Amino acid sequence: MLDIQNLHTYYGESHILHGVSLSVKKGSVSVLLGRNGMGKTTTLHSIMGMVPPKEGTIIMNGNEIQKKSSYQVSRAGIGLVPQGRRIFGNLTVKENLLTTARPVKDGWNLDKIYDMFPRLKERETSMGGNLSGGEQQMLSIGRALLTNPDLLLLDEPSEGLSPLMVREVMKIIKRLKEDGLSMLLVEQNLAMASSLADYVYILNKGTVVFEGESEQFDNDVKNKFLALSS
Ligand SMILES: Nc1ncnc2c1ncn2[C@@H]1O[C@H](COP(=O)(O)OP(=O)(O)OP(=O)(O)O)[C@@H](O)[C@H]1O
């Protein structure tokens, strides 16, 4: 579904991604790991056209998108749940959900989102800025789903959440996976990453230093490439 080859991305003169290649198969979850500052968010932003790459190709459903703007990438079928959630604080929950929605026959609609996240229905008229971190994460996921993406990019969805909320978010992502949604997940929470991944990539200084099936992502790999164990 998504195939990235040899991506080079810069911020001004700073060369951040050095030839990143990765892919997401239809209906599967690829997880992108790496310590802080290694280029995970930059990879997602490059895919979304927010920080366009200088070199490389990004193919989504057979079409090259590396030169498209963000709204075109969204129309090409990619949704983003951004790091830090990026909720519109001065819009209500319902407005947050509908502002970027793109209805599709038999796709996600407001009722389906409220079935999946009953808490958002209860808080429909609350301002986005007044929600808890967990509620904002639900809202951010719901907002992205309402663009009816074929592929969902999630940037550290567990960041800053309580253990209880991390489990909730994990359940939601599992359910989306069971429903067949393709996802590229950036995560620092190794337990969450391990339980959701079909395929794992590890980034180090803008280069993929490990890739493999989730079974190959064992403690040796974690210790060697992440200097962490789960
Ligand atoms: N807007 C920017 N301008 C200049 N440099 C940036 C900018 N955003 C990120 N960087 C730099 O690019 C590198 C990669 O950052 P990136 O946010 O992609 O890392 P990350 O792996 O997602 O880490 P984190 O988990 O901390 O978000 C870092 O060295 C960072 O300082």
Image (cartoon, helix red, strand yellow):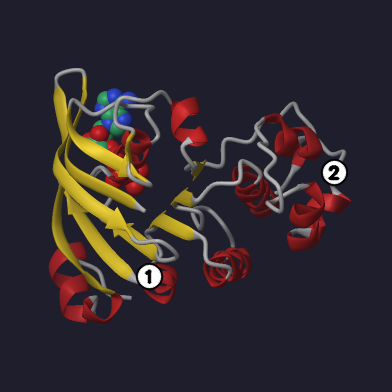
Q: Nearer the viewer, residue 160 or 148?
A: 148
On screen, residue 18 above or below 188: above
Q: Which mark is residue 197?
A: 1
- Going from the N terminus, do you reach mark 1 or mark 2 first? 2
On screen, residue 230 above or below 78: below
- Numbered label tally: 2
Q: Is residue 129 visible?
A: no
Residue 180 pos. (x, y %): 52, 66
| Helix, strand or loop under label 1 | loop
Quadrant, the C terminus: bottom left
Residue drawn at the location 18% of the way across and 65% of the way down = 211
Three-letter residue code for mark 2 = Glu
Q: Is residue 139 visible?
A: yes
| Helix, strand or loop under label 2 | loop
Residue drawn at the location 63% of the way across and 69% of the way down = 164
Q: Is residue 180 left or right of residue 108?
A: left
